[in-house]
Amino acid sequence: MAELTIIIPARNEELSIAATIKKLIDKVTVEYEILVVNDHSSDKTKEIILRLSRQYANIRIIDNESCPSFVNAFLCGIRNVKTPFFVAVMADLCDEPETINIMHKKIKEDYDIVAGSRYAAGGKRLGGSNLKAVFSRFMGKSMHFFIGIPTYDVPNAFKMYRSSVLEGMEIESRGFEVSAEIPLKAYFKGARITEVPTVWRERQAGASHFKMLKTGPGYFRLYLWAIFKRLIS
C-alpha cells in the first residue's frame, strides 16, 4: 500500500506532463500514488493525464475547483492526500525524481519536512534567470542564518511533508510563497526539518507561471513575518 503521494499541480502542461509522469515512474522506487491537480487547463493536459491513469493504476486526477493558481491547486492536492507523506513536484519536473527516494528514507527517520535544496552541498541550480537565482539564493540562505530554519532553500517547492504537520495550520499565501510559508510555520511550531541536495533545471517545454513582480511581494511579507517571529520568540 502506498504511503507517499506525489502532488503535481498542472495548468496547461500538455508539452511536459507525460514525460514528467513517465520519468517519475521510472525513477521513484518507493510505494507511491501520483495525484495530478488539473488547474483549469485549457489545453490537452487533462486528456493526457486521464489516458495515463488508465495505463497506470497509481495515477489519480482531480480538478482545482477554486480560482486558478498554484497555491489553490497545491492546497487542493493536500486536502486529497490519503497517505502519511506527500511531496510537491512541478509539472515540468525541474527537480530530480531520484531525490524523492532519498527524501522518503530521510523522513522515515522521524522528520516532519525534508527540503530538496539547491544550495546545500551537492545541490545545483542550472539555467533560469539570474534575477530569480539571486532572489531564491538570498532568501534561502538568509532565512537559514537569521531565523535558524535547518535548510538553505526555504523557497524551493520541492519538499516532502509528513501529512500531519499541516493539521491546524492556517495558510495565508496567495502565490508560490506557500512553499516557504508551510515550512516556516511548521518550524516555529517545533517541527523537525532537514534537507537533502537536489539539482534543479530550467524547464525545457511550456511556460513558467512564476512571475517575479507578482510573486516577490508575497515572499517579502513572509520574510518580514518570519524575522519578526524570531525576534519576539
Image: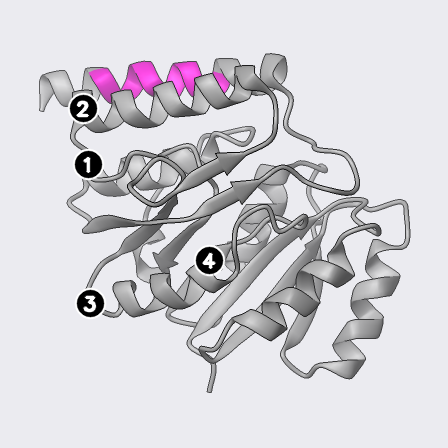
Query: Image height check: is 162 above or below 154?
Result: below
Residue at (61% x, 73% y) in the render:
25
User: Label 3 is placed on what type of residue?
Assistant: Glu
Give the alpha-carbon distance from disc 3 to disc 1, as whole Å: 20 Å
Which residue carries the number 1 mark? 188
Neighbour tally class for label 2: few under 14, some 14-19, many 20 plus, Cα within 10 Å: few
The mark nearer the N terminus, 2 or 1, is 2
In terms of depth relative to the viewer, which is nearer, 44 or 126?
126
Outermost residue toward the bottom in this view = 1
In the rendered image, residue 201, in percent from the top left (x then y), is placed at 58, 41
- Circles 1 and 4: CB distance less than 8 Å? no
Q: Is residue 81 visible?
A: no
In the rendered image, residue 166, in percent from the top left (x then y), is placed at 35, 51
Helix, strand or loop at mark 4: strand
The mark nearer the N terminus, 3 or 2, is 3
Closer to the observer: label 3 or label 1?
3
Which residue carries the number 3 mark? 109
